[in-house]
């Protein structure tokens, strides 16, 4: 399934102090464990317990600190102890957001336990990833988890295995590629080759499992990192500091040792959105979820190593949103659902009746009100097929191709916009209480 773009989250936390930090320890004799994760928009969503409260976190190699947010109804239960105030700045053009630093929290992931986990708690109602992913998200964890284990990521089966390093044994694997990692501010970087205008260019990329795009490159004319003439400006996603925009195009190839991916989607974010990300001068961009998901991944921070093996997603075509619509699961709506039933009667009570032996079968139709998610257009690419058809930001999608929108998840609904060029899209929307119909065809810009 094609995935809607969701931005990687690369955090820079001020002040950048080194504080005492607990470690995760696996509470079993095997010293290893396995958990399942949800794969939504190429992001891994894992179950995490914080101070005994079950939550959902994004597992993100691109963050050095554990961030907690969207906890307004859980604050008392979580027993979060407020400490010093700090400011967090991430991708996007907005201002930094304020947070509180909390120590001595108990965090559990499967059978892994940390009794002295530091958390950075963000109390900002606008920082809510649930509308963009369609499920509640309460936080992000990265380095604090990966530093203590050898982590195997099975994207194809949506499972995660983690092992205490001294217990993990590497198997012989002729079909694997192993690459050394560099670390900067507790974040892993990999050097790969990209082919632009027939020229192979080595680039240093942040490994960012918290980004759902394929590849981001920072423009650098001296290195030859510039978008081709065949590009278009698009919304790239959200960061902690706001929306991110940039140019989308394609690369001829991306090579990780002997693994070569062709016709790879790439985005060049605007400079205003990546000022903090470019503080690491040697960094040329990010390698994100739509690349990583094509491999079985082993991450070994202790040995500064990543090991890759192709999986069933490796040859999946790189696609992108051809409609110009970005959706959000924004609020709810009441839907009247038809409920047809049949019942046996001995007497005709005036309904439509069919004889069946000595009994009568009465067919009745009634309706029940149900609460369903509301899918709202929150971004509309300029001069896109959807915009030219007359759709507007704020429109609520009621039907797509004659199917009720509530039958789909946010990801399934967005999948329609990643189809083939020429695919016809019919939308019924609600706009300020008025029901309107629109139709357009998907257009390829690359």
Image (tube, rainbow, N blue to C red):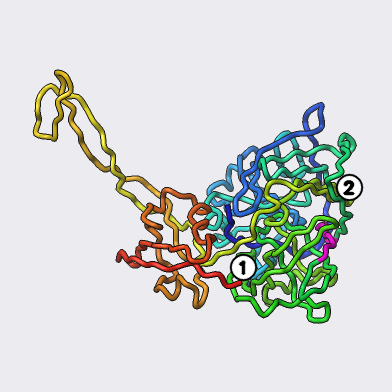
At horizontal 84% and vertical 56% (from top left) the residue drawn is 258
Q: Is residue 48 visible?
A: no
CA distance for labels 2 and 1: 33 Å
Q: Position of residue 374 (x, y in %)?
A: 42, 56
Residue highlighted by disc 1: 236
Give the overall secondary structure of the magenta segment: strand
**Quarter of the figure with residue 395:** bottom left
Q: Position of residue 35 (x, y in %)?
A: 69, 37
In the displayed structure, 133 sits above or below 222; it is above
At horizontal 64% and vertical 74% (from top left) the residue drawn is 246
At horizontal 31% and vertical 45% (from top left) the residue drawn is 337
In the displayed structure, 384 sits above or below 310; it is below
Side (left or right) of 119 relative to 422: right
- The dot on residue 61 is none
Q: Which residues are magenta?
A: 184-193
Q: Is residue 190 magenta?
A: yes
At horizontal 61% and vertical 72% (from top left) the residue drawn is 446
Q: Is residue 305 magenta?
A: no
- The dot on residue 302 is 2
Q: Position of residue 391 (x, y in %)?
A: 41, 70
Q: Is residue 425 visible?
A: yes
Side (left or right) of 154 relative to 433: right
Whichever of callouts 2 and 1 sits on the residue coming sooner in the sequence is: 1
315 or 114, which lies in front? Answer: 315
């Amino acid at each position: 399934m094609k995935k809607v773009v969701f931005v990687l989250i690369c955090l820079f936390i001020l002040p950048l102090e080194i504080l005492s930090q607990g470690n995760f320890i696996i509470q079993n004799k095997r010293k290893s464990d396995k958990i399942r994760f949800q794969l939504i928009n190429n992001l891994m969503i894992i179950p995490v317990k914080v101070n005994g409260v079950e939550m959902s976190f994004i597992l993100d190699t691109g963050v050095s600190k554990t961030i907690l947010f969207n906890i307004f109804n859980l604050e008392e239960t979580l027993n979060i102890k407020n400490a010093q105030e700090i400011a967090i700045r991430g991708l996007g053009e907005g201002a930094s957001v304020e947070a509180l630093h909390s120590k001595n929290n108990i965090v559990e992931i499967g059978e892994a336990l940390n009794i002295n986990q530091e958390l950075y708690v963000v109390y900002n109602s606008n920082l809510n990833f649930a509308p963009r992913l369609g499920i509640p998200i309460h936080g992000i964890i990265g380095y604090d988890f990966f530093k203590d284990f050898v982590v195997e990521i099975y994207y194809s089966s949506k499972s995660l295995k983690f092992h205490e390093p001294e217990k993990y044994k590497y198997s012989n694997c002729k079909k694997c590629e192993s690459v050394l990692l560099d670390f900067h501010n507790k974040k892993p970087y990999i050097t790969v080759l990209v082919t632009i205008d027939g020229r192979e260019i080595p680039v240093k990329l942040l490994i960012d499992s918290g980004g759902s795009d394929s590849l981001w490159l920072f423009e650098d004319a001296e290195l030859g990192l510039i978008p081709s003439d065949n590009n278009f400006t698009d919304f790239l996603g959200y960061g902690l500091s706001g929306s991110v925009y940039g140019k989308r195009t394609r690369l001829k190839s991306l090579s990780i040792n002997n693994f070569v991916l062709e016709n790879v989607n790439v985005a060049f974010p605007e400079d205003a959105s990546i000022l903090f990300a470019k503080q690491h001068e040697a960094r040329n961009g990010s390698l994100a979820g739509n690349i990583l998901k094509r491999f079985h991944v082993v991450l070994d921070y202790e040995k500064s190593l990543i090991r890759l093996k192709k999986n069933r997603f490796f040859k999946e075509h790189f696609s992108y949103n051809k409609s110009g619509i970005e959706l959000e699961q924004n609020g709810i709506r009441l839907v009247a659902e038809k409920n047809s039933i049949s019942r046996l009667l001995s007497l005709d009570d005036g309904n439509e009746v069919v004889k069946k032996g000595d009994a009568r079968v009465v067919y009745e139709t009634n309706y029940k009100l149900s609460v369903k998610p509301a899918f709202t257009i929150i971004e509309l690419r300029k001069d896109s097929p959807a915009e030219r058809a007359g759709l507007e930001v704020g429109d609520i999608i009621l039907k797509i191709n004659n199917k009720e929108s509530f039958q789909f998840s946010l990801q399934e609904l967005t999948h329609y916009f990643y189809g083939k060029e020429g695919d016809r899209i019919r939308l019924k929307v609600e706009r300020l209480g008025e029901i309107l119909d629109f139709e357009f065809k998907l257009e390829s810009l690359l």
